[in-house]
Image (tube, rainbow, N blue to C red):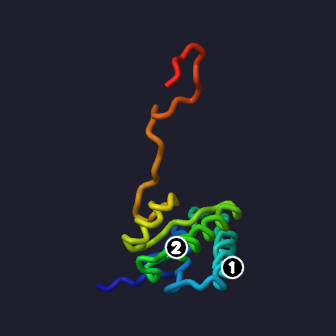
């Protein structure tokens, strides 16, 4: 017995965030359009369960360089200003290392969200506490 396929795409459900595929090396004149694309994707997914997240497929960027870091920083800023965030998909190890080196923290697809460990930060200083 052969059962029919459900309608729609098999790998997409209501919780799948929008995806923006970045083409190979991104020229500086393409950055404003990509930022507009991120904002538009955030607006179209504003009501769904994957709201507030745009997945940026960066596989075509390769190991990247400071140009790729600049593009990703601008996309992240555009997303934050629109009330969302971006998550990176398939970054090359060199690009991951470069992002860490320059101090930019991104969420990567398939990675659990980083949370601050409980009790790791002192919220307030009590009077009488000795200085560190």
Q: Nearer the viewer, residue 81 or 104?
A: 104
Residue at which label 2 appears: 66
| Residue at mark 1 to residue at mark 2: CA–CA distance | 17 Å
Residue at which label 1 appears: 32
User: Looking at this rendering, what residue extends furthest in the left direction?
Assistant: 1
How busy is the neighbourhood of tag 2: few (under 14 within 10 Å), some, or many (20 plus)? Answer: few
Identify the residue at horizontal 66%, vertical 64% (top origin). 47
Task: Give the label, 1 or 2, closer to the camera.
Answer: 2
Q: Nearer the viewer, residue 49 or 7?
A: 49
Place residue 4 in its image quadrant: bottom left
x, y percent for residue 52:
62, 62
Identify the residue at horizontal 65%, vertical 64% (top origin). 77
> Tag 2's secondary structure?
helix
Asked whether the residues under the numbered discs 1 and 2 touch, taking CB atoms below 8 Å apart as contact, a structural biologist would say no
x, y percent for residue 84:
63, 62
> Tag 1's secondary structure?
helix
Residue 21 against residue 86 in the figure, above or below: below
Place residue 91 in its image quadrant: bottom left
Quadrant showing the N terminus: bottom left
How busy is the neighbourhood of tag 1: few (under 14 within 10 Å), some, or many (20 plus)? Answer: some
């Amino acid at each position: 017995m052969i059962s029919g396929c459900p309608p729609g795409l098999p790998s997409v459900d209501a919780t799948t965030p929008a995806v923006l595929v970045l083409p190979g090396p991104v020229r500086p004149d393409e950055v404003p359009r990509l930022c507009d694309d991120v904002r538009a994707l955030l607006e179209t997914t504003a009501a769904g369960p994957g709201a507030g997240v745009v997945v940026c497929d960066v596989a075509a960027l390769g190991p990247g360089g400071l140009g790729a870091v600049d593009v990703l920083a601008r996309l992240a800023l555009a997303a934050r200003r629109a009330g969302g965030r971006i998550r990176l998909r398939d970054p090359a190890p060199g690009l991951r290392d470069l992002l860490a080196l320059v101090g930019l923290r991104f969420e990567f697809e398939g990675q659990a969200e980083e949370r601050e460990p409980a009790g790791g930060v002192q919220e307030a200083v009590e009077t009488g506490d000795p200085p560190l």
